[in-house]
Amino acid sequence: MCRRFGSFLAKRKEGGGMSEIKTLLQINVTANWGSTGKIAEDIGKMALTKGWRSIIVYGRNHKASESELIRIGNDYSVKEHAFESRLFDNCGLSSRNATRKLIKHIAAISPDIIHLHNIHGYYINYKILFDYLTKSNTPVLWTLHDCWAFTGHCAYFDYAKCKKWMDGCLSPCPCKKFFPKSLLFERSEKNWALKRKCFTSNKNLTLVPVSEWLGKLVKQSFLKDIPMKVIHNGIDINIFSPQIDADMLRARYRLENKKILLGVASVWDERKGLDDYLKLAELLPNGIVIVLIGLHEGIIKHMPCNIIGLQRTESQRELAMWYTLADIVLNLSYEESFGLTTVEGFACGTPGVVYNKTASPELITSETGEIVPPGDVQGIRNSITTILNRGKSFYATACRQRAVELYNNNVCFERYFNLYETLIS
């Protein structure tokens, strides 16, 4: 177990007396890396400003953090977990020793709140963890960033039109095409039953879906009787704001006099709509280009001439420059638990186009973009024409205002602390 502890005071004086510093311990697959890692980092920063102690436990991939970091396991244990999962379809049930060591640390730290994020990702044993959490009196808050908590093994299922998660995830699994499953077995039904037993046994658990759409699914699942509160993901509206130097990217990539359609994803696949971007590229007139961020180098080489493919960037400022430069942010994903890229575009004054699918339509209004039936590439083309004819300035003020009012991380994450205080008291 690798640890980095920042300096802290276990006690502080207030009015001549002594009062304990509250401790927040978050668990996520990454630390300050990727979307969920950055969310946990921002929550940790807010905890520190409130005088709390902030600890983030992670499994793999991290950047420097203002919180204390504890890594569970190591690179070898992550690979071992992934290998065992591929053999036996038991994702989340390996990493036994690493999880037991973590529990010893949690018991020694004795946090006031344990905040879970993504506990799938080949790094932690959820059964061992929840056995401990159920016996502990510590309040547990679990932010649901996807659907994994109430399925046999899938983070999403809408694209496959699967409803088996509602009554047991009976085999065979129709989502196998999108989520690598076991080479030897399929345990979807057993996994579903074990998750139901583990997650519904904890009487100190509160669930926080990140969208109304996800919250409705939770209420149809075996988690329906667990206390729940929807809290939207937030963004740093100071980082994601109109960038005055964004035009430097236009010169760097020879985009002078071009209209720019932007797509951003950490993983590009069929569910993220990559094929639809390629179909759209065939319909676009000269003068309009698509920029896709987050592509692998091998895929970039095969992009058509009117698609500029870029690899993933962890620089939020660079992303903000692209959002500012773009005329439209496209999110053609068929499965979104929230839709962070759309909101980040809003914050930079850029309208969006999304499919009328999962959580994406919650974000868009007539003043901030267009909603298109899923898979309707010609409809996307028509929406692009509508927005470009009106001009970006028609949408910019409403987009920025919507991001500031609804998705400011200081406002969104303050709701977590209100919930923490309620649970602690």
Image (cartoon, helix red, strand yellow):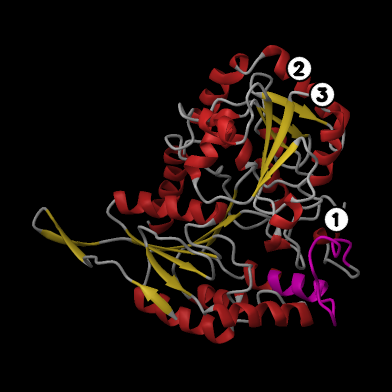
Q: Which residue is mark 3?
A: 285
Kind of residue at badge 1: Lys
Q: Residues within 10 Å of mark 3 (few under 14, many from 20)?
A: few
The location of residue 359, given as percent across then percent down, is 70, 41
Marking on residue 372: none
Q: Earlier in the sequence, mark 1 or mark 2?
A: 1
The residue under the point 38% across, 68% down is 111
- Most extreme residue toward the right is 172
Mark 1 vs 2: CB contact within 8 A: no
* Quarter of the image where one finds residue 60: bottom right
Residues in magenta, as a range: 173-195
Queried whether the magenta region covers residue 180, the answer comes back as yes
96 or 184, nearer to the observer: 184
Residue on which the image places disc 1: 163
Q: Nearer the viewer, mark 3 or mark 2?
A: 3
Distance between the alpha carbons at the discs numbered 1 and 3: 40 Å
